[in-house]
Structure formats: C-alpha cells, structure tokens
Amino acid sequence: MLVVFAGAIIGVLVEAFVPRPLRRSVHLVVTFGALLAAFIWTCVIAGSSTIFAKGSAGHVAAMGAVAVDRPTLFIQGTILVLAFVSVLLIADASHDVPEFAGQAAAVPGSAEERASLLAGFVHTEIYPLTLFSVGGMMLFPASSDLLTMFVALEVLSLPLYLLCGLARRRRLLSHEAAMKYFLLGAFSSAFFLFG
C-alpha cells in the first residue's frame, strides 16, 4: 500500500515540476513502476515465513488499524493485477484523440475546449488519481476497524468521482455521471457513518 501511495505522491510532484510534453511518459514510468513494485512486494510478503511463522494469522500494523493476512494479500494482489491492466487501457495511445479531456474546467463544446484539443493537451492527472484510488482499494480489505474502512472508502472513491467527469466524448453525460456518483457516494458515506 505504501508503494502505491508513494507512487501517487510522486505523480503529484511530476504534475507540479515536469514540463507538459514530458509528463505523460514520466507518469507512465512512475505508475507502472509503482504497480509492479507493489505487486512484487505483495508476493514477497505472501511468501515470507516471518510474518506467518508459528501459525500466526498475519500482521497488525498502524496501532491495530491495518491487519495483513493471506486473504488480504490475495485481494491486494488481484487489485494490483487489475489496476495494471486498467492503466494499460487508459494509456492506450492507438487513438488519434485521447480518451480524457485536455482541460477539465473547459465547458463542453466551447472554444476553450476546441483550443485545448487542437493544442494536443493531454490530461495527465489521471495517473496519480488512479494510483490514489488503487491505494484506497488496497487499504479497504486490510482495514481492521470501521474508521480505517471509511477512510479507505473515501480515498478509493474521491479520485473516481473526478475520473468519471473527465471523459472527452459525451462530456455532458460524463459530468452528469460524476455528479450522480458523487451524490450517491456522499449519501452512502453518511449512512456508513451513521451506522
């Protein structure tokens, strides 16, 4: 989990300091590197004899907030493999026009959006957002109390709200979907907290 979150933070720093033409390639290296390193580290932990020595069920960390056992490691490994495939699909450059909008704040169909399309802007923030969401997905099965589970749910879902609204095609429908997803997530989070 820490490797994925570190990759996401490095991705945010890439957005801040790397020139626009180089961002996509640097993001791809950071994202694929973080996912691959996290998967390898998960496999090493699963095969480790020290954590599961003497019949131990697993390891409890972060003052009891996170518990790592074999089912958790299996779920995290599955999440990492699916995330790797998803990033491959997101990074597919076989299309002439990228799948995500060049500027999220541009009004659909406006002159500003056309200018960003003609300039070839690519929305590279999707890579750190994806890593933050994957980190939340990995924290969710490892949480051992309800507060950690709630934090994992929010870290998982908040980047997905943004990613839903960034589609280039059918922009108004993607904005509507992102708003509906946000409202549904807010209500479900409130019910979770009240419960």
Image (cartoon, grey):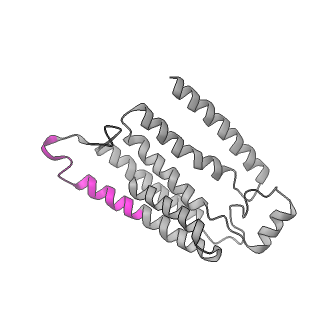
Taking the spot 62% from the left edge, 71% from the top edge, the residue there is 93
Judged left or right of residue 48, residue 181 is right
Camera-side residue of 137 and 23: 23
Above or below for 105 versus 138 = below
Q: Position of residue 167 (x, y in %)?
A: 70, 56
Question: Is residue 90 covered in magenta?
Answer: no
Above or below for 56 versus 164 = above
Judged left or right of residue 61, residue 54 is left
Q: Position of residue 26 (x, y in %)?
A: 53, 72
Q: Position of residue 14 (x, y in %)?
A: 55, 68
Which corner quadrant of the image does residue 120 belong to?
A: bottom right
Q: How many marks?
A: 0
Above or below for 176 versus 9 = above
Taking the spot 72% from the left edge, 57% from the top edge, the residue there is 104
Above or below for 193 versus 178 = above
Q: Main secondary structure of the magenta part?
A: helix
Start and end of the magenta stretch? 36-55
Q: Position of residue 24 (x, y in %)?
A: 59, 71
Taking the spot 30% from the left edge, 57% from the top edge, the residue there is 43
Judged left or right of residue 13, residue 169 is right
Furthest residue toward left:
54
